[in-house]
Amino acid sequence: MNIKKQFKEGLITNNPVLVQLIGMCATMAITTTLFNGVGMGLSVLVILTCCNVVVSAIRKIIPDEIRLAIFVVVIAGFVTIVDLLLQAFIPALSAALGVFIPLIVVNCIIIGRAEAFCQKNTVGASFFDGIFQGLGYTCVLIVMCVVREFLGSGRFGGGLIDVTNGFRFTLDGTGGGIQIFPADYGASILNLPFGGFITLGCLIALMQFALKRSKKKKEEAEKAPQDEEKEVA
Amino acid sequence: MKKIPKLTFILFLICAITAGILGGINELTKDRIAEQNRLKTVKAYSAVLPADDYEEIPLTDALKAAYPSVDKVSRAANGSGYVVESTFSGAQGMITLAVGVNNSFKCTGISVISHSETSGLGANAASSSETGVNWRAQFLGADQNVALKKAGGTIDALAGATITSRTVTEATALSIRLVSELG
């Protein structure tokens, strides 16, 4: 396991949402403004990295029979810590994400990585796995937010960017975003949960298309030199 | 059978460590969270009735029975009036609303604290967009007989959101009536 391969896996070839198809509930529910998407993505990234490190550090003393119970305790612990910290320091994000922060406990990405990766790998590898899988998740959320916000309400960067008094970043979620076209012309259907389904479906289709094509190209590239050799012979 | 005590012990140990850490974090963040919640209330309330602080006043049992949807009533510290917080059933879910009422029983503003109305339609009642701000401004100065135009009143319903508009209007009328009964 090298870092470069893990990076590629987390972001592209084994992306948690688009390829593993897990953790989709929150993905569809919260991706209505960029502020929510970035906040949720980073929260998951932090929790995932912490859980990965702890789970792989104690993997040798965990008896196999009760491993799931222990994973859940560890995950729930970190989720509660993040939840409390958000409530105390970024209340706007805590209010916007609502129940979806506590629900990270049952997010398949985290328990899935603990079960599939951290059980068998070193602390270092698990740490990078957490970061890259978390980044992969965050990227999907950001793409979903940008698409839904733009088509749904004609905006970019809602909550995170404020342009009323010059360009600045608002970390308290109060920014109105950049209005690209009037909100009344937006397809507000995309702000609703089923708009999330449609956007996610299109993204997954695109991803599968791209993955299949690059795989085909790779196979052809491997085949081509052999054919040439035959012709020469 | 030796295995079960061992498993129990390991699980107990991990739970105990987790609980200890969480207790510590809770102790560290407790005060800040309480302060943030107070600020949130003050912010929501000062949008409908400006004041530095608000003091919750207890309701009599008779008033509680007459106004079951009212969550709490607070008096502005500067004596300019009351803020009534109530929860009503809207088109999609519950709507929690703060209504400011001055001492002559006129509405000084309304603010939707939480809701799950349809985005682009009923959600405009809570939004900070021009539509939302203008719509809520209609309630300024309203008395306890405030009603939608359809019902013979003066309030324009939000386009495509009759139920949400009716709920908010009824909640406002009810809040003003409650304050007038407080005396």
Image (tube, grey):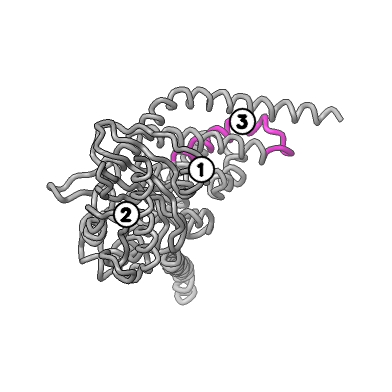
Is A180 placed above or below A99 here? below
Q: Mark on residue B21?
A: none
Q: Mark on residue A102?
A: 1
Residue drawn at the location 58% of the way across and 31% of the way down: A57
For disc 1, the chain is: A
Tag nearer the camera, 1 or 2: 2
Type of the residue with mark 1: Pro
For disc 2, the chain is: B
On screen, residue A216 versus residue A161, left or right, reads right
Q: Toward the viewer: A17 or B79?
A: B79
Tag nearer the camera, 1 or 3: 1
Q: Which residues are magenta?
A: A46-67
Tag nearer the camera, 3 or 2: 2
Quarter occupied by residue B6 = top right
Q: Is residue A217 visible?
A: no
Is A97 placed above or below B81 here? below
Q: CA distance from mark 1 to mark 3?
A: 24 Å
